[in-house]
């Protein structure tokens, strides 16, 4: 299954631009370049849905996509790429903290982590911020096409270990390149968001 009937709604620089209605949202978060926009394209089977780039900081605003008039996917800018620019960092933090803490429409967050690397302090900080919201958190480890079977099971064990205090977390190891586990993730998201 893939998500069909997905259309771009708007890009928001701040809360004044967020859509005003009761439609639920699922937001994709993670460090810059982890593969958020690529994942969005993979789950909608549309390479042009969200802009993808190997340059850090490709997505600069919060982008809303409607799925079948039933719920929205939200593509967020990534953290951790403007460490040496206080101004840019402040702007990003404000935009994302505002969304994470104030957006009532959010039903779930998908936190993306790069399966090729250890979790960063930024990943843990973001996770802790999400926990505070009491909303559902799904962990997606991206770029799994770069790992062999042994590395995959070790990585999964490692993140289960790091996040174990948080109870029953849903974790997917995916690849937007070879589409592994994309269908499982789509089924999970669609069921969650339609109920
Ligand atoms: P920002 O918008 O800057 O926060 O980045 P992003 O998290 O949206 O990442 P994006 O989807 O733009 O992808 C960043 C880079 O990683 C691109 O060069 C993608 O082609 C690559 N990439 C994304 N997903 C995968 C994957 O599953 N496997 C591999 N091998 N590369 C990937
Ligand atoms: Mg992006």
Image (cartoon, rainbow, N blue to C red):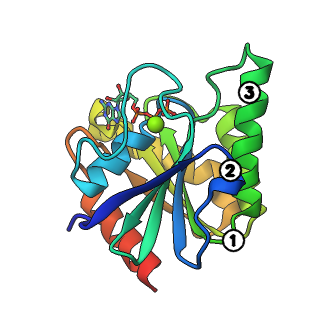
Q: Are marks 1 and 2 in contact (CB under 8 Å)?
A: no
In the image, residue 108 sits, relative to residue 34, either above or below, namely below
**Disc with the residue nearer the chain's start (1 vs 2):** 1
Q: First in sequence: mark 3 or mark 1?
A: 3
- Tell me if residue 111 can be seen: no
Residue 127's label in the rendered image is: 2
Q: Position of residue 118 (x, y in %)?
A: 56, 31
Q: Nearer the viewer, mark 2 or mark 3?
A: 3
Q: Are marks 3 and 1 in contact (CB under 8 Å)?
A: no
Which of the two discs, 2 and 3, labels the residue nearer the N terminus?
Answer: 3
Residue named by callout 3: 89
Left or right, 57 with respect to 46, comes to right
Q: Relative to residue 76, is residue 66 depicted above or below? A: below
Real-space Cα separation, disc 1 to disc 2, in angstroms: 18 Å
- Which residue is denoted by mark 1 in the rendering? 104
Disc on res. 3: none
Q: How far apart are marks 3 and 1 (CA)?
A: 24 Å
Quadrant in the rendering for residue 84: top right
Residue 129: horizontal and vertical position, in percent?
A: 75, 52
| x and y percentages locating residue 90 in the rendered image | 79, 30
Label 2 residue SS: helix
Q: Is residue 11 visible?
A: yes
Q: Is ligand 1 less than 8 Å from the beta carbon at label 3?
A: no
Number of other residues with Cα within 10 Å of mark 3, as a class: few under 14, some 14 to 19, many 20 or more: some
What residue appears at the point 38 percent right and 76 percent down from the top-left corner?
A: 69
């Amino acid at each position: 299954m893939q998500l069909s009937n997905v259309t771009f709604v708007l890009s928001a620089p701040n809360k004044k631009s967020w859509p005003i209605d009761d439609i639920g949202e699922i937001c994709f978060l993670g460090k810059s370049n982890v593969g958020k926009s690529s994942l969005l394209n993979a789950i909608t089977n549309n390479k042009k849905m969200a802009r993808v780039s190997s340059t850090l900081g490709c997505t600069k605003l919060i982008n809303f996509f409607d799925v079948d008039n039933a719920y929205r996917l939200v593509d967020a800018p990534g953290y951790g790429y403007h460490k040496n620019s206080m101004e840019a960092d402040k702007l990003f933090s404000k935009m994302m903290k505002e969304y994470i803490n104030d957006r009532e429409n959010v039903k779930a967050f998908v936190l993306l982590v790069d399966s090729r690397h250890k979790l960063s302090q930024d990943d843990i900080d973001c996770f802790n911020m999400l926990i505070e919201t009491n909303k559902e958190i799904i962990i997606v480890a991206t770029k799994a096409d770069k790992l062999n079977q042994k590395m995959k099971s070790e990585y999964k064990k490692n993140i289960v270990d790091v996040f174990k205090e948080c109870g029953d977390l849903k974790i997917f190891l995916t690849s937007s390149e070879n589409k592994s586990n994309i269908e499982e993730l789509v089924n999970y998201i669609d069921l969650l968001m339609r109920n």
